[in-house]
Structure formats: C-alpha cells, structure tokens
Image (spheres, grey):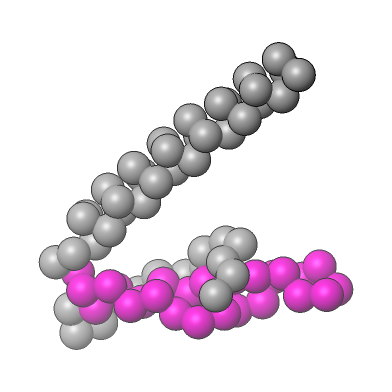
Amino acid sequence: MLIEGLGTATIVNGMMRIETLYRNAKGEDVSGPELLIPVSRVAAVAQGLQLLLERAQEAAKSQAAASDMN
C-alpha cells in the first residue's frame, strides 16, 4: 500500500478511520484504503510513527553526509 497523504479522520464505535491518499497518473490525489485504529491505541501508533520519522530523518542526514564526502 502506497500512502502519499492523509485525508479525513472520523471516530465511530471506538475506531478511528483515517482516509489515505495517493496520486494517480494525472497527478490528482485519490482515496486509498482506510487505516482503522482503535481509539485506545491511537497515541501508541502516533508515537511509533514519530519514532520512525526521527529514524528516517537521521538516515537521510547520514546519506547526505556520506555523499558529500564522496
């Protein structure tokens, strides 16, 4: 599943539904599959995504520094 953005989010019956977005061949954002997260786990999922973001930023910096040395 490719996710290039997030759309609307709703909470119904204890579940958060988050619309995912991706770009089609015309460059338009279109809806993809929904993410379903129990409301009781939203904070844990958000913290996990934040950790992954920090790791990705560190990796990008390391790659940039390595390419600058070459």
Residue 37 on image: x %, y %: 28, 73
Residue 6 on image: x %, y %: 52, 64
Residue 42 on image: x %, y %: 24, 62
Q: Residue at x 72, y 69 (%)?
A: 23
For the magenta stretch, what is the residue range? 15-39
Q: Residue at x 19, y 69 (%)?
A: 39
| In the depicted structure, whether residue 54 falls above or below residue 18 | above
**Quadrant holding the N terminus:** bottom right
| In the depicted structure, whether residue 41 falls above or below residue 66 | below
**Quadrant holding the C terminus:** top right
Judged from this view, the residue extending furthest toward the front is: 70
Q: Quadrant of residue 61?
A: top right
* Closer to the camera in the image, 18 or 3: 3
In the visual, does 38 lie left or right of 20?
left
Q: Residue at x 39, y 75 (%)?
A: 35
Residue 27 on image: x %, y %: 81, 68
In the visual, does 48 lie left or right of 3?
left
* Closer to the camera in the image, 65 or 6: 65
